[in-house]
Image (cartoon, rainbow, N blue to C red):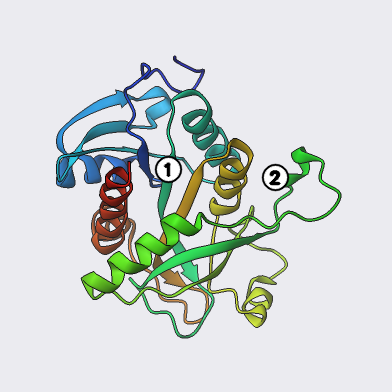
Amino acid sequence: MSTPHNTAAQGDFAKTVLMPGDPLRAKFIAETFLKDARLVNNVRGIQGYTGTYQDTPVSVMASGMGMPSMGIYSYELFKFFDVDNIIRIGSAGAMSKELKLRDVVAAQAACTDSNYAHQYKLPGTFAPIASYELLETAVAIARRMGVRMPVGNVLSSDVFYDASGASMDWAKMGVLCAEMESAALYCNAAYTGKRALSLLTISDSIVTGEELPAEDRQTTFTQMMEIALNVAVEMAGKG
């Protein structure tokens, strides 16, 4: 069924969807890694593709930027298109001095300054966490690939330009990096009984001020992409 934000037909999406924020990164993944990729959604330029990787159906669709956008697209994929797994493959700003540009991080959990979880009317503070099954699979794949991939807590923030200057306070609590979507994705997965994981490539450092150009973010974060694609293959193999 179509939704206000997605014109795909039922069955157009694979059980696992890779979800970058940037539509151009979605296009790059489809053209570079997927065989016989076809465009299944392009409402508002949020490109969604389905093809095969190692003979396994895999989809890739952009989420847009920020938790409201991720909240819409991931919810619709989980709720209306029978998607079981969403793997966010995004960029993040390092908050740990141990992280370098292009390092890959797996988000075990997502702290947030967002009010996204307020909608569930819980009598406390919900802790958005990744699917352990997806996380365990990704860690094993990264190890086989020889990719160093720290696992830990990230910050999903509603604010990119932080007027308070408080971002690094999170680092004192061991938070590895900052991004803008994972907490909403993890909330939606919990609410719908599905699985989610965020894999993040360090595109800039809040510690050092270093950053990569936008083009690099679209086309050169291939280690993260290959880990996610192989997770999709292994999950399909589990039936």
Quadrant for the N terminus, please.
Answer: top left
Q: Nearer the viewer, residue 110 or 239?
A: 239
- Tag of residue 140: none
Helix, strand or loop under label 2? helix
- Tag of residue 85: 1
Residue displayed at 41% across by 59% down: 199
Residue displayed at 49% across by 59% down: 132
Q: Please name the amino acid that badge 1 sits on.
A: Asn
- Crowding at label 1, few (<14), some or many (≥20) Cα neighbours within 10 Å? many
Q: Position of residue 114 (x, y in %)?
A: 70, 52
Quadrant for the C terminus, please.
Answer: top left
Q: Nearer the viewer, residue 53 or 39?
A: 53
Residue displayed at 44% across by 38% down: 84
Whether residue 20 is situated above or below residue 47 in the rendered picture: below
Numbered disc in front, either 1 or 2: 1
What residue does disc 2 label? 116
Q: Position of residue 51 (x, y in %)?
A: 21, 34
Q: Earlier in the sequence, mark 1 or mark 2?
A: 1
Q: Please name the amino acid that badge 2 sits on.
A: Tyr
Measure the C-alpha gap from mark 1 to mark 2: 20 Å
Q: How many labels sit on residues?
A: 2
Q: Are marks 1 and 2 in contact (CB under 8 Å)?
A: no
On screen, residue 124 versus residue 101, left or right, reads right
Look at the image and tell me whether residue 91 can be seen.
no
Q: Nearer the viewer, residue 166 or 238?
A: 238
Q: Position of residue 198 (x, y in %)?
A: 46, 56
Give the farthest residue toward the front: 239
Residue displayed at 44% across by 65% down: 106
